[in-house]
Amino acid sequence: MELIEKIRWSMKYTTGVTVIDTERYQLLKSFNNLVASVHNKELFPEQLLSFTMACSTHFKNEEKYIADISFPTSKNHQIFHKSFMYELDLYNIECISGFSIEPIKVVNFIYQWWETHIQNEDIFFIEQQFKRQEQLFYEPEIA
């Protein structure tokens, strides 16, 4: 299995919602730290846990935002998040329990999620929100 390279931040990842975009940038930095730790058996579990925690916080804030704008498919979006978190949790359990884990497999899994969810699903709901011309102000949940 081939190692995925680090992802460079691009404006195509932005939504126009400052808190969401800031968290996405932090997720990308955390992912890149994970990629850098693939060959370090001691550091990889720490980086995976850090990425997982960042995802959890981001998903809570994003789901709150989606609910606040009454986005019609918000429940489906939550299911995507829960499914992804379930997989991350399994990988974390494997790391903590000392089971053999393939870091490259984990990184590739996260990369595929980034490519499909961040660039497709999330962008779709933001485009829909802007089409409706709704502007909301909210405070993100602080973990």
Image (tube, rainbow, N blue to C red):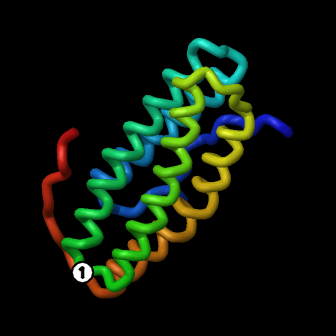
**Image coordinates for residue 54, horizontal then vertical, percent:** 38, 39
Say left or right for 21 vs 42.
left
- Residue at 48%, 65% in the rendered image: 80
Residue receiving disc 1: 70
Image position of 135 with respect to 25: above or below:
below
Residue 95: quarter of image: top right
**Image coordinates for residue 61, horizontal then vertical, percent:** 27, 55
- Front residue of 77/20: it is 77
Say left or right for 82 vs 40.
left
Q: Secondary structure at mark 1?
A: loop
- Residue at 47%, 50% in the rendered image: 85
Type of amino acid at the residue the image marks with label 1: Ser
Considering every residue shown, the one lying at the far right of the view is 1
Task: Tally the marks.
Answer: 1
**Image coordinates for residue 142, horizontal then vertical, percent:** 18, 42
- Residue at 41%, 45% in the rendered image: 55
Say left or right for 118 vs 24.
right
- Front residue of 70/21: it is 70
**Image coordinates for residue 119, horizontal then vertical, percent:** 56, 63
Image position of 81 with respect to 99: above or below:
below
- Residue at 61%, 21% in the rendered image: 98
**Quarter of the figure with the C terminus:** top left
**Circle 1 crowding by C-alpha within 10 Å: few under 14, some 14–19, many from 20:** few
Image position of 24 with respect to 101: above or below:
below
